[in-house]
Amino acid sequence: MPNKGLTPNPLPPIFSDLSAIPRHKPLQRKRSQEAAELSDTTLISYEPASGEELWRGTHSDVDAAVSTARRAWAPWAARSLIERIEVLRAFANEARRQSEPLAELIARETGKPLWEARTEIDAVVGKVDVSVQAYAERTGKKKFDAGANLSAAVRHKPHGVMAVLGPYNFPAHLPNGHIVPALIAGNAVVFKPSEKTPAVGEALVACFHTAGVPEDVIQLVIGGPETGQALVSHPGVDGVLFTGSANAGLAINRRLANQPGKIVALEMGGNNPVVVIETPHMADAAALIVQSAFTTAGQRCTAARRLIIKNAVYDDLMEHLLPLTRKLMVGDPLGEPQPFMGPVIDNDSADRLAESFMMLMTAGGRPLLHMRRTVPDLPFLSPGIIDVTDVPDRPDIELFGPVLQVIRVPDLDAAIAEANNTRFGLSASLIGGTPEDYGRFWANIRAGIINWNGPTNGASSKAPFGGIGLSGNHRPAAYYAADYCAYPVASTERDRPRANIGVGLRP
């Protein structure tokens, strides 16, 4: 059974040595090697679907960016809240105006289909109104009577300079979910996009600047992991807002363990379960599972990694799930007709996923639908489904791609126990059952997002977004991002001094 501690356990032996398995050596990897040779000065981004170079840029000076942000944030914070909101609304309008070129850029740089990239831009635009409402509700000014001509107040102040580190799977929406509430609160932002999606990061920042956010108030920092490390540990940074893998998040947590003055919000991954019990709607259940596991080629932190099925419904569900999954189109993100899935982000990721699927088979997993490389030398993968019920010591890791592991159980109690058999705790879904079943599921599942008869992904921006365990550090994002973008200040106030000392004085 997986280790439930709060630090990653070593991979089981069958997952620890992948060097013996032959690797592809495609053109894209050769170009990645070229990028590595230039990595001291230049960052290069390639299109996953073609392997062609999309963008290149020079690594940024972190010290200069932070120093500039420190000078800029106080004047920005001194502007009225209404003025900052007006500028952010102008940003939403600019993102809306640029929606089609932005969506195409996201599709080209991430490999996600254009239809999905368009929904990401919709989320970017919608984030402003949601963040304005959240700031008013969660960090609004409060005053109340404290008696004896004394009033009390609660107001909020910005932290200062916030470092935002974004992921590649939602290169606009997820960092934007930190940036917008941080700017509304009066912070300056230094934004480092994933080294795999710098072009989208650059385009996003350009929209902020065009809308009127001063260039010094939000800056783009380009670079690889070393640049991110320098930004996280910089003494001029007052907060770190991170979205990405558990390993990277834990590294940030360790690096800042002796700096309690920095606010740190870690939004990490998940080994998310979708549980299926009795339902007369098995076709709908299958569709929900496909949406949960294979949207964005499985490259979502909320994607279902484990399908936990009650034995009594296993055969019925598979009669719907397997044919539906075989029908999923995997193809060019800009192709017509639009595919359900594009490629994963790069060949290294595709290799690791294919190797992990093979290792699960070696450990005793029974493939129900083989994962395959569908285009030579490019990171296109067909969805893979594998029954791992009989695999001992199933690895508690996030396989970030279109791999779904199936586990059969006798009843709901066993399903809940299996769903909780992880160090992660981001998202979980129950499909089927009664309101009483869902009440039991909700009460006992360890996760920050718990759904009934819905997918594990697609969370609303009007709700908090975050998890427990290796999925986060109790700083939920989305609607609750306002909480970590400003800190509360309590005051007691009179219009004149008034006090006396009534005891302990010599006559």
Image (cartoon, grey):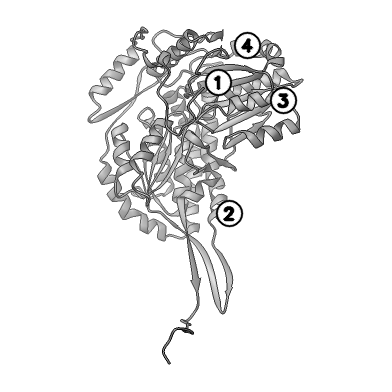
The Cα atoms of the two marked residues, 2 and 3, are separated by 35 Å
Q: CA distance from mark 3 to mark 1?
A: 20 Å
Q: Position of residue 400 (x, y in %)?
A: 47, 23
- The residue indicated by pointer 2 is 137
* Labels 2 and 4: the sequence-earlier one: 2
**N-term mark: 2 or 3:** 2
Q: Is residue 17 left or right of residue 368?
A: left
Under tag 4, what secondary structure?
A: helix
Callout 2 amino acid:
Glu
- Of badges 3 and 1, the one in the foreground is 3
Q: Secondary structure at mark 2?
A: helix
Q: Alpha-carbon neighbours of circle 3 within 10 Å: few (<14), some, or many (≥20)?
A: many
Q: Does residue 98 appear in the picture of this structure?
A: no
Quarter assignment of residue 295: top right
Position above or below: 309 against 203: above
Is disc 4 in contact with disc 3, using a CB cutoff of under 8 Å? no
Q: Nearer the viewer, residue 328 or 421?
A: 421
Q: CA distance from mark 4 to mark 3?
A: 19 Å
Q: Residues within 10 Å of mark 4 (few under 14, many from 20)?
A: some
Q: CA distance from mark 2 to mark 4?
A: 45 Å
Q: Is residue 289 left or right of residue 98?
A: right
Q: Residue at x 29, y 49 (%)?
A: 235
Residue carrying label 1: 294
Residue closer to the observer: 110 or 163 = 163
Residue closer to the observer: 467 or 288: 467
